[in-house]
Amino acid sequence: MVNVLLVHHSPSAATARIAEAAESGLRMPELGDIDVTVRPALEASAEDVLAADAYVLGTTANFGYISGALKHFFDTTYDAVREPTAGRPFSYWIHGGYDTTGAETAMKQITTGLGWKLAFDPLIVTGEVTEEHLERATELAATVAVSIP
């Protein structure tokens, strides 16, 4: 059985809706037997990362950067997981009010450093979250799940 880890920081109703859509993509029956682990960013551990075969990440864009919670997740897991998880598939979403540029750059730099392989183009949302965004979050997560070698 494969395991996909969904780590997110979803403090608003809008980002919570994206997280729920992503989780529903991981739990689609047609994907087969997938073990899904969902962790708020402040609760996710290196053990969670090491146990997973792929990753779906979500964050708000705060003051031009990823959320402090997701930054904390990376800070506390990076060294322990960098080598053993290199090459694993992932994707992510970012939701911001106006500008996500700094958060996008941070996600690219951190995940490149981890050596993870982007399985689906990131979902970048500014402003209101639409049904189209939610559908794309579902597709993003499902694609990550089926990208596990």
Image (cartoon, helix red, strand yellow):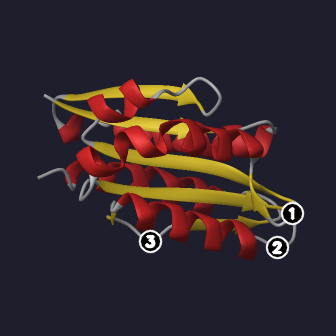
Q: Residue furthest front?
A: 79
In this picture, is 122 found above or below 33? below
Tell me which residue sits at (27%, 55%) in the image.
86
Instruction: Find residue 121 and name its label.
Output: 3
Classify mark 1: residues with Cα within 10 Å, few (<14), some (14-19) or many (20+).
few
Indicate left or right for 65 with 136 as reference.
right
Dot 2: element: loop
Quadrant position of residue 104: bottom right
Query: Which residue was labeled with disc 1?
Result: 97
Measure how far apart labels 3 and 2 are at the Cα level. 18 Å
- Asked if the residue under mark 1 is in contact with the one under mark 2, i.e. CB atoms within 8 Å, the reply is yes
In this picture, is 33 found above or below 100? above
- Asked if the residue under mark 3 is in contact with the one under mark 1, i.e. CB atoms within 8 Å, the reply is no
Measure how far apart labels 2 and 1 are at the Cα level. 6 Å
Relative depth, front residue between 68 and 78: 78
Tell me which residue sits at (34%, 33%) in the image.
27
Q: Amino acid at mark 3?
A: Asp
Classify mark 2: residues with Cα within 10 Å, few (<14), some (14-19) or many (20+).
some
> Can residue 86 be seen from the camera position used here?
yes
Query: Which residue was labeled with disc 2?
Result: 99
Mark found first going from the N terminus, 3 or 2: 2
> Can residue 9 be seen from the camera position used here?
no
Q: Amino acid at mark 1?
A: Gly
Quadrant position of residue 100: bottom right
Dot 3: element: loop
Classify mark 3: residues with Cα within 10 Å, few (<14), some (14-19) or many (20+).
few
Indicate the position of residue 129 as horizontal and vertical percent values. Answer: 73, 57
Q: Amino acid at mark 2?
A: Asp
Dot 1: element: loop
Quarter the N terminus occupies = top left
Indicate the position of residue 23 as horizontal and vertical percent values. Answer: 46, 36
